[in-house]
Image (cartoon, grey):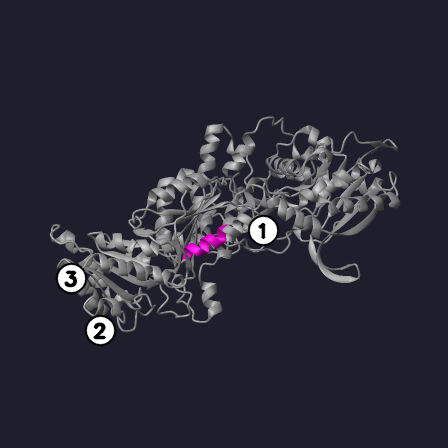
Amino acid sequence: MPSLGADMESGTLLKWYVKPGDAVKRGDIVALVDTSKAEIEVEIFEEGVIDELLIPEGARVPVGTVLATVRPNAAGTSPAVSATVKDEAAAPPPTPAPEPAVAPAPTGAAQPLRAAISEDHRLRVSPLARRAAEQLGVDLSEVSGSGPNGAITKADVERASSPAVAAPITRAAAPALAAPAAAPAVTPTARQAAMREAIGALMARSKREIPHYYLELQIDMSGALEWLHQANLARAVNDRLLPSVLLLSAVARAVVEMPEMNGFWIDGAFQPGAGVHLGVAISLRAGGLIAPALHDADQKSLGEIMAGVRDLVARARAGRLRSSEMSDPTITVTNLGERGVDLVHGVIYPPQVALVGFGAVRERPWAVDGMLGVRPVVTATLAADHRASDGHAGSRFLTLIERELKKPEEL
Amino acid sequence: MSVTPTNTITYREAMREAIREALLADERVFLMGEDVGAYGGCFGVSKGLLEEFGPDRIRDTPLSESAFVGAGIGAAMGGMHPIVEVMTVNFCLLALDQIMNNAATITHMSGGQFAIPVVIRMTTGAGRQVAAQHSHSLEGWLAHIPGLKLLAPATLADARGMLGPALEDPNPVLIFEHGSLYNLEGELPVDGGAVEIEHAAIRRPGTDVTLVAYGGTLPTAMTAADELAAAGIDAEVIDLRVLRPLDDAAVIASVSRTHRAVIVDEAWRSGSLAAEVSARIMEQAFYELDAPVARVCSAEVPMPYPRHLEQAALPQPGTVVAEVHRMMGAVDDG
């Protein structure tokens, strides 16, 4: 399976144009592949005779999987020779027309092997997790992995087996935030396209209807991070807190004092939210973004927020969110710091009226009491609906968040 | 509980005390090797013993490992309990035929008529800028050979206590002393004596991941475990102690608790003891594993002389920590 774009992880073999025994030469079109963005005709770079088609039509396989073997003309019919051609067959041919620059996928020798084992993408599951799944009756295809290279671990299985997983809702119906979402193909094409369409419609509506105003504030995180470090020393590995938990908690607690940021703009009037339900922006592996609610975040301890976020991430990626989580968020928080950017000017998710963004925590020169020091600093941004609030209120909101982060022990 | 009186002692001194005690306890015991007498041993282990025990029992030998290791094996067949010091594991290659074809086989080939109660001590390992010909960790090669027992004392207690039982063992026993450990200093009970030489030991109990180490990599693993603890990961450290026969049960029991294992071995990865331990975990505890077994070994290059390159080639605590973090999987909050 050739890489037909830097963001492609796998592709669906839609149609074979050749069959075993067909003579092929460099440049011939041998197959049609769906990348979820477009259908692409695949050229061949070898001259010879098609030996064997390894992947059936309709199968979805990772980039780098051997699709077929080719017997070189000069080498007769020796199967040993055909084996040596396998790796070359996996090399990415250049992209035909509409795709951007081709990035050859970093495929290792393991890829052809994997294809030989299974036509479909094989789930990566630790032996212990597989055993636990059997004992707990968990369907591994519904579990998202947190281990090395996305492998499913025992902890993932145990999380997935916890009760109260309501009916899954489709991702297409989920609210989505604007992000330059790469769309590597993992979900079926139709669903993927529907999700992009939903994101597009929602964000267009937001930009069309909501008069955004933007504010930003740089916050010294040294006290908060030092406190976090100390707090984590006392915690078990599974209970460790990430800095983003502090940020979520600070927003939740600050917004209690700023009800005009927490709610909805409906039919020309502001309606305050009943409770603080943080929409937590989660990027999906398949591309796109989803922002389910962390309910009553202002009432939760840091540990509860951490557990809640882990749970949301796991279920969001498994497509198992609950409908209430999709409709309840009263304000959204997006944290793009881990992607390496300094700040994010967000697009508000209608009908909400505010979105708080965080960039990366970076060490910066920082003046304190007339002296210059180096402090970890995060840039907090606010995108707010000018119909519901003014810059004065927005400024106060950001400084309240800063205040919360200055007393992490109370978060 | 009564307080046991202790002495401050180095690893080097603990080895010397062990040899002294063996010499005093049994007149069949003698020490021989290159420079063990007048010079006091290349690493200073036998300093003062010539003066105390005389040239019959502390014997300097010619520079021929094959000859004096063979002589030691012959003496053992004749009823003596020799301690043969080979300066470093690198030089034992010159005596490999004696070790493999004689020491390891004669009991078998004589139908049990001969025991070979010889102990062959040697320094092993890198880290002291002695370059590519004097920095090997060849324990894994020798651990390949049936008929030998291999010990790797990594603590003061083991340096002090392994030699006695090794001399009592009717089989040839090889003791590997990592060169970086000789200056290790600590407290040891005044009456510290023999230790068992059958089992691995848990040097640090933990619940999240098992670090398997021996000899010179034990301090590496312990430092890594401390760093991991600061990050909230509770690592268990297993000291193999006995490299042949391996104490599978201890390793398997630990991995069955932690479900993850990283093997820290100063030898080259290919065909190493680390490979052997990894294979045994796979064979015996596959269904306990929550992640593939990982190994931290030396870079597969001739050991560099410059300090920074040598340190880069050797297993470091930071490498072990990074491997564990990779194994635990990055926590992703989206």
The vertical placement of A48 against A332, above or below, is below
For marks 2 and 3, give the CA distance.
17 Å
- Front in this rendered view, residue B103 or A113: B103
Indicate the quadrant containing the C terminus of chain A: top left, top right, bottom left or bottom right: top right
Q: Which x, y percent locates residue A238?
A: 56, 40
The residue lying at 40 percent from left, 67 percent from top is B303
Considering the numbered disc 3 on the image, is that residue within a helix, a strand or a loop? helix
Q: Give the image quarter of residue B285.
A: top left
The amino acid at mark 1 is Leu
The amino acid at mark 3 is Ala
Q: Which chain is home to disc 2?
A: B
Start-end of magenta stretch: B217-225
- Number of the label disc, if any, that sits on residue B75: 3
Are dots 1 and 2 on a single chain? no
- Number of the label disc, if any, that sits on residue A4: 1
Q: Which x, y percent locates residue A366?
A: 75, 59
The amino acid at mark 2 is Pro
Tag 2 residue:
B62
Q: Give the image quarter of residue B32.
A: bottom left
Q: Which x, y percent locates residue A49?
A: 43, 51
For marks 1 and 2, give the CA distance.
70 Å
The residue lying at 36 percent from left, 63 percent from top is B12
Considering the numbered disc 2 on the image, is that residue within a helix, a strand or a loop? loop
Q: Which x, y percent locates residue A211?
A: 86, 43
Q: Which chain is home to disc 1?
A: A
Are dots 2 and 3 on a single chain? yes
